[in-house]
Amino acid sequence: MVDVQLIPRGITDPRVLDALRKVPRHLFVPERIRASAYDDCALPIGEGQTISQPYMVAVMTEQLKLEGDERVLEIGTGSGYQSAILAELCEQVYSVERLGPLSRHAKKNVMKAGYNNVEFIVSDGTLGYSEACPYEGILVTAGCPEIPAPLLDQLKEGGRLVLPVGDRYQQVLTTVTRSGGKVKTEESILCVFVPLIGKFGWES
């Protein structure tokens, strides 16, 4: 997966590549489709949600520019795969999921993969998780109609917020940085995510 799908498409951060080599993606997909676990595509995980394609996981993770000592907020736990990748790369992960069954299953997946530095929260992800802010990194794994204001408020000076922004059918991967009291926004590739549901996202 790493050598054939990710490196040829421009993923270069060695820590990100090592994390994607280490975390067993097949543990995070339903057993009936595990033969496709390492294909470069999104896969259904139940509750109308998906596990992102490996390339998108790599791109978003690389844009966070993690060094190892960060506290990272993840919005949209899903199967827990992205949570495990982040857990490999930073000090502590807080992962918010609005669907309780998914969050509970993700916790089992992440623990089975050997990570105990992830806290799982069932809540409206568009509100973030103010109890543990500010965060050096925030990653949103669902499509946003706009950048949720609470996430900007919870981003630490020097931190990076990575999220897909657009309509329900297509988004642009966006990276927001906070530096010197100013917020800078950069857009990169087109992408398609399930919608971010919540007070500062889509209604349903």
Image (spheres, rainbow, N blue to C red):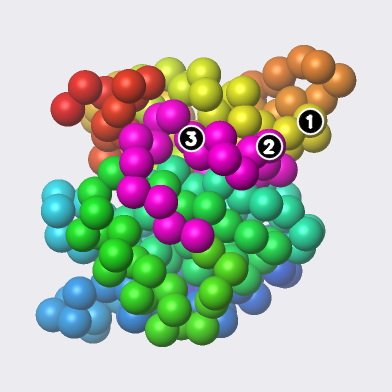
Q: State the residue position of label 1.
A: 157
Instruction: Report which quarter residue 181 is drawn in.
Output: top right
Q: Are marks 2 and 1 in contact (CB under 8 Å)?
A: yes
The residue under label 2 is 134
Q: Residue furthest front?
A: 131
Q: How many marks?
A: 3
- Residue 101: image quadrant is bottom left
Q: Is residue 141 above or below residue 196?
A: below
Query: Looking at the picture, which amino acid does disc 1 mark?
Result: Glu
Q: Secondary structure at mark 1?
A: strand
Residue at 14% across / 53% down in the picture?
47
Q: Amino acid at mark 3?
A: Gly
- Residue 87's label in the rendered image is none
Q: Earlier in the sequence, mark 2 or mark 1?
A: 2
Q: Residues within 10 Å of mark 3 (few under 14, many from 20)?
A: many
CA neighbours of label 2 inside 10 A, class few (<14), some (14 to 19), many (20+): many
Residue 29: image location, x then y, percent: 27, 72
Residue 116 is left or right of residue 185, and the answer is left
What is the C-alpha distance between the residues marked 3 and 2? 10 Å
Quickly name the residue at label 3: 128
Q: Nearer the viewer, mark 3 or mark 1?
A: 3
Q: Which residues are magenta?
A: 119-139
Calculate the distance from the C-alpha at mark 2 to the C-alpha at mark 1. Answer: 8 Å
Quadrant where the image shows the C terminus: top left
**Amino acid residing under circle 2:** Pro
Q: Earlier in the sequence, mark 3 or mark 1?
A: 3
Residue at 23%, 83% in the rendered image: 35
